Image (tube, rainbow, N blue to C red):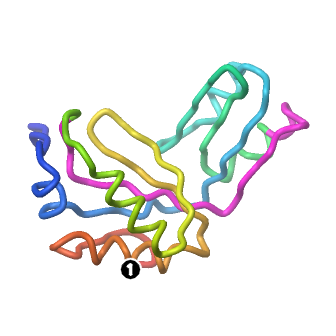
Amino acid sequence: MVPTPPVRSLQEALAGMTFTVEPGEFHLIGFPEPPSGADLDALGSPPAQIVRDAHETTLLLRGERVGEVLARHRGARVESDLVWIRFETPMAWELVGFLALVTGALARAGVPVGAVCGYSRDHLFVARRFLPATRKTLESLFSNGDSRGPLG
């Protein structure tokens, strides 16, 4: 399979963008300790994310692995019932303004978001209760209005 070349301008990204709501429920978990090998294993099947900064470890993962992580990290904080949204069009690193435009529109709609940046694609996570407003906002931004995934 030949990879799709990344778009290089905001106009191209908006004109061709589609998004997918990943199936399942996701959870954001934060704890002060470094991650263990078992925490890395808990990332399981994609999509998932791990961030380690000077203050905490953050995992964004599917619901079926949350209990085991919380058992290892008793003081962990958790945000539950999140949905993961993947933007399908690959974007070049030098493309400027995509997330700013998307998150600004969602902020105006009153939707709190988290962002995950992959090498070629951006992703958002939002509380499930905000999914209808999120979907409406994203469909208004992209000229093709195409969205796929559960609740579509």
Q: Position of residue 100 (x, y in %)?
A: 35, 53
Q: Secondary structure at mark 1?
A: helix
Measuring 63% from the left and 29% from the top, which residue is drawn there? Answer: 41
The answer to which image quadrant residue 54 occupies is top right
Q: Nearer the viewer, residue 48 or 110?
A: 110
Q: Position of residue 125 (x, y in %)?
A: 52, 56
Quarter assignment of residue 85: bottom left
Q: Magenta segment range?
A: 70-92
Name the residue located 32 percent from the left edge and 70 percent from the top edge: 148
Find the residue positioned furthest to the right: 74
Crowd tier of the residue under label 1, counting other residues whose Cα lies within 10 Å: few below 14, some 14–19, many 20 or above? few
Image quarter for residue 145? Answer: bottom left
Left or right of 137? Residue 56 is right
Q: What is the x, y in percent for residue 26?
A: 61, 54
Q: Is residue 141 left or right of residue 14?
A: right
Relative height, residue 151 to residue 30 (above, below): below
Q: Is residue 118 magenta?
A: no
Comparing 101 with 58, the one in front is: 101
Q: Is residue 87 magenta?
A: yes
Q: Amino acid at mark 1?
A: Lys
* Quadrant that contains the N terminus: top left
Asked if 33 appears above or below 123 in the picture, the reply is: above
* Residue pictured at 66% horizontal, 47% vertical: 28
Q: Is residue 19 left or right of residue 62?
A: left
What residue is shown with label 1? Answer: 136
Q: Position of residue 119 (x, y in %)?
A: 31, 33
Residue at 21% over, 52% down: 89
Query: Which image quarter holds the C terminus?
Result: bottom left
